[in-house]
Amino acid sequence: MFCSASLGAQDLGSHFQKIRDGIYVYGVDDVAGRDPSSNCGIIITQEGVVLIDSGPNPPDSLAILKAVKHLTPLPIRFLINTETHNDHTTGNFVFSPPAVVIGAAGATAGMKKYYDPKRNEKLIAESSEMREAFRGFRVITPHLEFNDRMTLNLGERTLELIQLKNIHSDADAAIWLPKERVLFSAAVAAVKRFGFLRPFVTIENIKSDIKNLKALQPEIVVPAHGRPTAVQLLDETDKFYDVLLERVGKQIAQGKSLEEIKKDPDLPEYKTWSGGKSRLNTNIEAAYRALKKP
């Protein structure tokens, strides 16, 4: 088991969790009626700090930067983006320079594609705090991209970067710390929440990556969204896709169309999962594609 207590005693704030010595997670997932915001991992080593994603938005990034300065005088050496979407990458400019940004192959192109100045304009209009946090904003894409696997050794820690293919964004990466048995699993799974599966995402690839990540035998799993948990998260997600394929397959055999299946997918055991009907529909569509392909 791991310590999930907030670090209020260290004045970091209620949104920080210590999961191992020198390893923290920042996440804002306690606002009623809102899906969990993206997580940021803080990994402190003897030679500097590694961040996993840059926080949901720039005010979060500034809170993370303040916490890092509270924890250590050492610089932030690396920032690893687990995906290309704005809620994981917009705050990159807060940390780089000096941090070297790393992403899986295709991350640069993906970030440029997803960058939406209108999203930023809307956020900036929300408050003076947001406007101030965006000061100096610029799109920071990876300085380094990797294919398949990459090992990062910094101080006493080893981080293994694992490319995940066609599971959420244009370029997804999980990060595994073998000594600490900690896995940052990216968006391959979320805590009782339906993923948003874009047309290029395949359930086959999701299940394959879940299998590979489970084989690492992690003790702590930090998803892209939601509170840190254990390997059961991967088991739970894997089972969901098995059930989904079975139920959709059964209805296809009954001659039902995709739209008919969406109206009644026969998944009562998942009615408490968050994400809404639109996210669930993307999962049904992916299952339908998988079962109907030649």
Image (cartoon, rainbow, N blue to C red):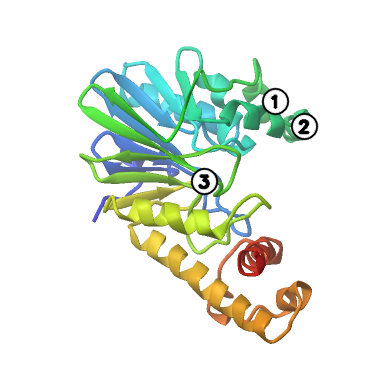
Split into 4 quadrants, where in the image is the N terminus? Answer: bottom left
Q: Position of residue 242 (x, y in %)?
A: 49, 71
Mark 1 sits on what residue?
131
Up the image or down, 226 lies above or below 138; here it is: below
Badge 3 marks a residue whose secondary structure is loop
Give the class, few, some or many, for how many residues have Cα within 10 Å of label 1's Cα (few <14, many ≥20): some
Label 2 – label 3 distance at C-alpha: 21 Å
Residue 107 in the figure: left or right of residue 153: right
Q: Which residue: 45% across, 17% down?
A: 99
**Point 64% across, 28% down: residue:** 109
Q: Amino acid at mark 3?
A: Val
Cβ atoms at labels 1 and 2 below 8 Å apart: yes
Q: Which residue is mark 3?
A: 28
Between 135 and 178, the one lying in front of the other is 178
Cα distance, mark 1 to mark 3?
A: 20 Å
Residue type pointed to by label 1: Arg
Question: Between 8 and 164, which is closer to the camera in this rendering?
Answer: 164
Name the residue type under label 2: Ala
The disc placed on residue 125 is 2
Residue 113 appears at what percent x and percent y? 70, 31
Q: Looking at this view, name the residue that lies furthest to the top.
A: 98
Q: Earlier in the sequence, mark 1 or mark 3?
A: 3
Q: Secondary structure at mark 1?
A: helix
